[in-house]
Amino acid sequence: MSCIIIKPHFFQIFLFFGSLALFVTNFAVAFDVLTSTEPLTKDQTLVSSGENFELGFFRPGDSNKWYVGIWYKKILTGKTIVWVANRDNPLTNSSGLLKIGDDGNIQILDQAANTIWSSNLSRVGNTVAQLLDSGNFILRYTDDADPENYLWQSFDHPTDTLLPGMKLGWDAKTGLNRYLTSWKNADNPSSGDYSFVLDIHGFPECFLMNKGNKSYRSGPWNGLRFSGVPEMKASSPVMTFLFVNTKDEVYYSFELHNASLYSRLVVSYSGSLQRFTWIDDSKIWNLFWYARKDQCDAYKECGNYGVCDTNASPVCNCMQGFEPRNPQAWNLRDGSDGCVRKHKLDCGNDGFLSLHNMKLPESSSTLVVSGMSLADCETMCRKNCSCTAYANSNLTAGGSGCAIWATDLLDMRLYAADEGGQDLYVRVAASDLDQAGNVGSGNDSDKKTRIIIVTAIAAGILLMLSVIGIIFVWKRKSQHVQKSIIDHRGSRERSQDLLLKAAVIPSKRDHSGESTTEELELPLFDFSTITLATDNFSEKNKLGQGGFGCVYKGMLVEDQEVAVKRLSKNSGQGIEEFKNEVRLIARLQHRNLVRLLGCCINMEEKILIYEYMENKSLDSILFNKERSSLLHWQRRFNIICGIARGLLYLHQDSRFRIIHRDLKASNILLDKEMNPKISDFGMARIFGGDETEANTRRVVGTYGYMSPEYAMDGVFSIKSDVFSFGVLVLEIVSGKKNRGFYHMNNQLNLLAHAWKLWREGRGLEVMDSAAGELYSTVDVMRCIHAGLLCVQEHAEDRPNMGTVVLMLSSESASLPQPKHPGFCLGRRPHDTTSSSSRQDESCTVNQLTVTILDGR
């Protein structure tokens, strides 16, 4: 009987606990979602469906600040935090709420109901937030049938940790650039000093940054791994490394082969990059990999052209054909000044030094052409005199693709044969290549042969120098006689002599450190000859007028057509411009630079004589509706490439590094075949071999073409010219002026308009209809792409002209995605002046001197 009574009671208890268990289970499963009606408090958490991750409020270490973060649920030895929402806006106490706000955003509220953090989207409607088993905290519409259609996700806003499936890099559709940033310290998750970023320019690679300065470099992704991380094995049993590089996104990620394993990549507040894996048996996080791990991991440890090798002592070495830039510091084992070439390059006769097991040089300015063979890559590099090195860009399937460097080679290191790295081919002088591989080897007969050869060469050089010396003495005597005659001439000749002596070009410094100069040998024309050639500067021969004077067509007695630039007598700046042109352009010889034939000085008259350009200036055709059709697309493309080659010569291949500072359409002249020639060097500046930028209080140039850093701060460099070139490219493609361009009612200038169309995938709409219908879409888009890269707001983001020339010359080159251009703010139409109503003028405002042509 008692049994009959107990049975139902036991059954009821069983049903009660069974129902309770079911309830708890259902509660746990449901509580990975945050809804608008159920906010989260300090004592509650969200747990992902597979219980991998947990989200809630936490207080790190001894801190009295509260944060909302995500940590591993199953790892019970302390909270391993992988993401923090309000890292830079902590709660001062535990009375906070995590909720879905009225506008549909995820919000953290303090005790006064103030929003201290939000997902910060435009009003989105009815939403829910969910913690996924990947550790991703996402926001989506309540009624969206697609579970992966996220409005917002924490994976797009990482803190110091990269989890499997997270992307490090750039997304073109959203404009997001995802990177890791360290904590301040163990008890403070706010943004620290160190960050790990993917540089998407050129040949993409990762950098560890310390307060914005590069501390460590991964090397570029070569299809198998980052070049400087040999530990990344393609056949790893633990994880797979992913790298995606398309026009829509560039990112690095990794996936684990076993979902039950835990691995994370962390930027430590102590300044190291660390990968941990969880060892469940011993309940510890094992340090799987880290950087920086040795001296050669330090960024630019051995400077330009230096190679770091941890197996050598000292670790820094110069490649064959190079020597230490600073021998004294080098001998003290400070290699940071790097190496320099022993002999100058001779483009057509140079060779390539083959280096094996190398971490490839820094590659942000590198040109990448996919699908090209290594032999074709060498040919491409050999043909371009600015190319300093080349390598395969992809090591899969035996190697393919081409990476070309057109800058100094930085941050290289040598690995042991079994460690990794890849082959790199460095351009060296042919004489240095002949010596390659002979260091420390060879027999005595080889050495004797080399000694004999060197002795013979030295004897030949001495003989040649003797002959040159005799000729030099004879020439100096002749000049002395001529000078005696000149000294007795009248005031016109004396003024010529004085002015030309002022117009000298700086040469190399002598051993005492004093700057030396060299006299110019520029033909002098009589004023009467110029007057006759121009029909007394007749209006019918006038070609144009600028801020420093007029330009006339002239005919010399030899039936040679010339352009005569007569500087204004009343322009104080004319003297400086005249001297500058004589200093610079007289020494420059390039098919895409206008040639200076001579000059004339007669009392107050200062005249320059140039080769005659039949088609005048580019702007006279490009911006003229009646004539612009003369510039069909192929001509426009040839003009762009010609200007690029001329500018590359000025920046890199000429005897001196020259910054033009006033590159614009009116300073591009066209010969009878429409070949472009850069002109007007009155504002140009010479840079020394080691100079990269300079500052001036007198900003000269033309609005619409000046780079932001130059216009605002007076800082100019080769990147200032690159910006002007980018503006020119977009003007040539579009047929529109940058300054004075307005698109409907959007108040955009040309740069902003081109950027907007590019971002919307409508870049081809930039093209001028007057360019005709016969054109290559690839060429047009490549020009627009290169132009946008050149006009990026920050100078360091812009390519140099060597890279630009390579971009324009290769149809299959992979170009980096451009960032926001500088000076995108438009101006009201009535603030500009029409091109028909203005001449060149010089205006000075607050010590900024700017020449403006045609209201640009």
Image (cartoon, grey):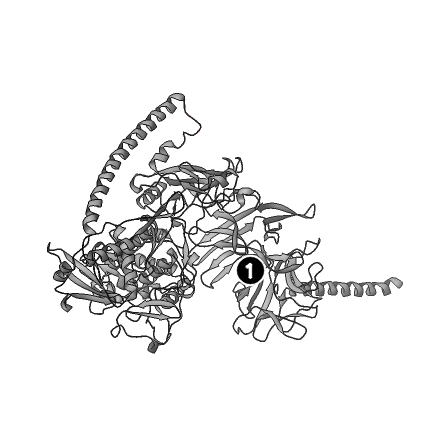
For the view shown, which residue lies furthest in the top direction?
Answer: 445
Quadrant where the C terminus is found in the figure:
bottom left
Q: Determine the main secondary structure of the stretch shown in magenta.
A: loop
Q: Nearer the viewer, residue 699 or 532?
A: 532
Residue 454 versus residue 729 in the image, above or below:
above
Side (left or right) of 439 relative to 591: right
Q: Give the amino acid type for the residue marked by disc 1 in the picture.
A: Phe
Quarter of image, res 142:
bottom right
Residue at image coords 23%, 38%: 471
Q: Which residues are magenta?
A: 438-443
Residue 610 appears in the figure: no
Side (left or right) of 269 relative to 540: right
Quick one: SS at disc 1?
Answer: helix
Number of numbered discs on residues: 1
Side (left or right) of 468 relative to 763: left
Residue 417 versus residue 593 in the image, above or below:
above
| Residue with the mark numbered 1 | 155
* Whole-percent x, y for residue 339 in the image: 44, 41
* Whole-percent x, y for residue 300 in the image: 49, 46
Residue at image coords 31%, 42%: 347
* Whole-percent x, y for residue 491 in the image: 20, 58
Q: Residues within 10 Å of mark 1 (few under 14, many from 20)?
A: many
